[in-house]
C-alpha cells in the first residue's frame, strides 16, 4: 500500500509538470491565434488586446510610426474600415535567438491583398507591417 501511495504521488507530480509546461506553449501559440482571428475579422479592438504599450505600424509600404496602444487601435480601425477583410492566413512563423517571435501572412481585403509581418515579444505585438502586394 505504501508503494502505491509513492507511485501515485510521483505520477501526480509528473502530470503537473507536463500540464504546466504545455500550458506555456499553448499560451504562446494563443497569442498568434488571437492576432490571426482579430485581423481575419477586422477587429481593431480584439487586435489591441495583444498590443504592447508602444506599437510600430507601417501601412502600405510607408515608414513605420510608433503609436501608443490606444492610438494604434484607432489606426487599425481606420485601416480595416478602408480595407475590409476577406481572409487572413499565416504562411510562416518563427522566432529569433533573442526571443522575438514573428509571423508572416497574407491579408486579403476587398481592395487588394497585403503581406503582413507581425512581431511579438512577450506575447505582445511590437510591430505590424501591412505591405501592399
Image (tube, rainbow, N blue to C red):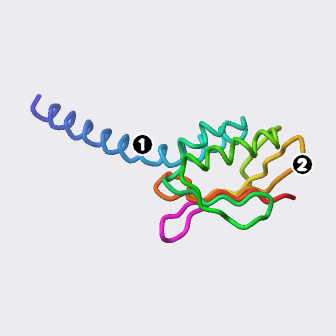
Towards the viewer: 71 or 124: 71
Q: Which mark is residue 112?
A: 2
Measured as percent of width and height from the top left, residue 89 is found at: 74, 46
- Does the magenta segment cover residue 129? no
Measured as percent of width and height from the top left, residue 111 is found at: 90, 45
Q: Assign the N terminus to one quadrant of the image.
A: top left
Residue 65, quarter of the rendered image:
bottom right
Q: Which mark is residue 57?
A: none
| Crowd rating for badge 1 (residues with CA inside 10 Å; few <14, some 14–19, many 20+) | few
How many numbered marks are there?
Answer: 2
Q: Assign the C terminus to one quadrant of the image.
A: bottom right
Question: Height in image: 39 above or below 4?
Answer: below
27 relative position to 116: left or right: left
Label 1 element class: helix
Q: Which residue is mark 1?
A: 23
79 relative position to 46: left or right: right
CB contact under 8 Å: marks 1 and 2: no
Give the residue at x 53% y 41%.
Answer: 49
Magenta residues, start to end: 93-102
- Does the magenta segment cover residue 95? yes
Question: Height in image: 62 above or below 6?
Answer: below
Label 2 element class: strand
The residue most toward the right is 111
131 relative position to 17: left or right: right
Measured as percent of width and height from the top left, residue 99 is found at: 48, 65
The residue most toward the left is 2
Measured as percent of width and height from the top left, residue 108 is found at: 83, 45
Residue 29 appearing in the image: yes
Question: Height in image: 131 above or below 16?
Answer: below
Residue 93 appearing in the image: no
What is the spatial separation of the Cα atoms under label 1 and label 2, in whole angstroms?
A: 37 Å
Amino acid at each position: 500500500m505504501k508503494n502505491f501511495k509513492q507511485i501515485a504521488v510521483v505520477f501526480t507530480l509528473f502530470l503537473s509538470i507536463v500540464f504546466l509546461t504545455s500550458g506555456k506553449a499553448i499560451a504562446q501559440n494563443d497569442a498568434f491565434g488571437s492576432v490571426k482571428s482579430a485581423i481575419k475579422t477586422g477587429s481593431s479592438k480584439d487586435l489591441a488586446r495583444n498590443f504592447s504599450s508602444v506599437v510600430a505600424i507601417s501601412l502600405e509600404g510607408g515608414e513605420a510610426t510608433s503609436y501608443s496602444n490606444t492610438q494604434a487601435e484607432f489606426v487599425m480601425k481606420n485601416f480595416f474600415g478602408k480595407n475590409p477583410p476577406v481572409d487572413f492566413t499565416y504562411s510562416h512563423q518563427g522566432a529569433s535567438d533573442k526571443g522575438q517571435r514573428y509571423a508572416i501572412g497574407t491579408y486579403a481585403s476587398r481592395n487588394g491583398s497585403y503581406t503582413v509581418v507581425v512581431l511579438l515579444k512577450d506575447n505582445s505585438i511590437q510591430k505590424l507591417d501591412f505591405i501592399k502586394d
